Amino acid sequence: MVNLEIGKSRYKHVPAYIVAAFIVFMLALPPFWMILTSIKTGRDVFSIPPKWLFIPSLENYKVIFSSSAFSKVVLNTVIVASFATVITQLFGSMAAFSISRYHTGGKPMLYGTLIMRVLPPVVIALPLFIMFAKLGIIDTIEGLILAYVGFLLPNTIWLLISFFDGIPKSIEEAARIDGCSNLYSFLHISLPLARSGMIVTSVYNITGAWNHFFYALILAPTKTRVLSVEASQYVGEYVVHWGQIAAIASVLILPPAILIFIIQKHLVGGLTLGGVKG
């Protein structure tokens, strides 16, 4: 009887494992197929049925890396993603702390931060283009960074609010009794305690800025284009160079994947901590 119960308990999670394995397979298949496409020749890319066994080729990578503008495009992407992340983290953390501790602006301010996210990007793109054109920052690094900050800031604020809510106010009150100013308390007490939240939002922001396409296409399509827009250069009127597009896409997903792999312990811990209210 005991052995029967042990056998039942051993296999009761099998359906969950099967479902989880199926979900992992469905999520992993597109990037896996993209990487396979990037190392295929033109004939293998368009073969029907698709070829799973073929002679790998780095020709597509040679084509994209031999482009005279590719190094500048990569540099533009790094600069935009880095500065957009730093600026978003700076203003997002201050706004989240202010809303969490002092309820700044009340509910209108809280929900007003989501306007940039709830509206479809195509609705915001035209006003942004007109405003940036008047300011003279179309097709500039500064303009694209500003657009990305506006795009990333709402989620950063909402994520960080939950982390600051989880920090006991008594710690900050004790610091103020000892003579600390609000700014000192924020910088040296609350912000270090919300380190996990800062890591989570930093990964979210740098990944979003690194991969974003729509605003980059509208606001910086030529002189300061980034990697996501560079891929569109291989879409012609009569032919699409899927091998080169897949190669650029593979280059795009590599840095975020490495970053997430390196800090995965902090990332999982931060996501868990952010879901708990103090």
Image (cartoon, grey):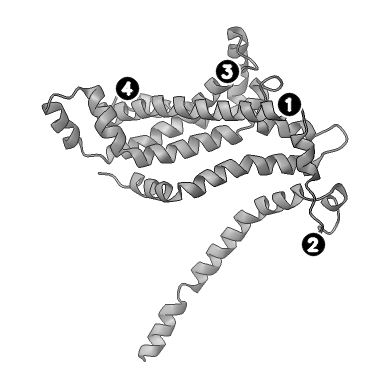
Q: Are marks 1 and 2 in contact (CB under 8 Å)?
A: no
Figure quadrant of the N terminus: bottom left
Disc 4 and disc 3: Cα gap in Å? Answer: 28 Å
SS at badge 4 = loop
- In this figure, which residue is indicated by the disc labeled 2? 53
Q: Residue 105's mark? A: 4
Residue 164, position in %: x, y? 30, 36
Q: How crowded is mark 4: few (under 14 residues within 10 Å), some or many (20 or more)?
A: few
Disc with the residue nearer the chain's start (4 vs 3): 4
- What whole-number distance in Å separates the C-alpha atoms at marks 4 and 1? 46 Å
Mark 2: few/some/many CA within 10 Å (<14, 14-19, 20+) = few
Quadrant of residue 218 within the rendered picture: top right
* Discs 4/3, front: 3
Q: Quick one: which residue is furthest to the left in this view?
A: 177
Q: Which of marks 1 and 2 is nearer the N terminus?
A: 2
Q: Mark 1 points at which residue?
A: 69
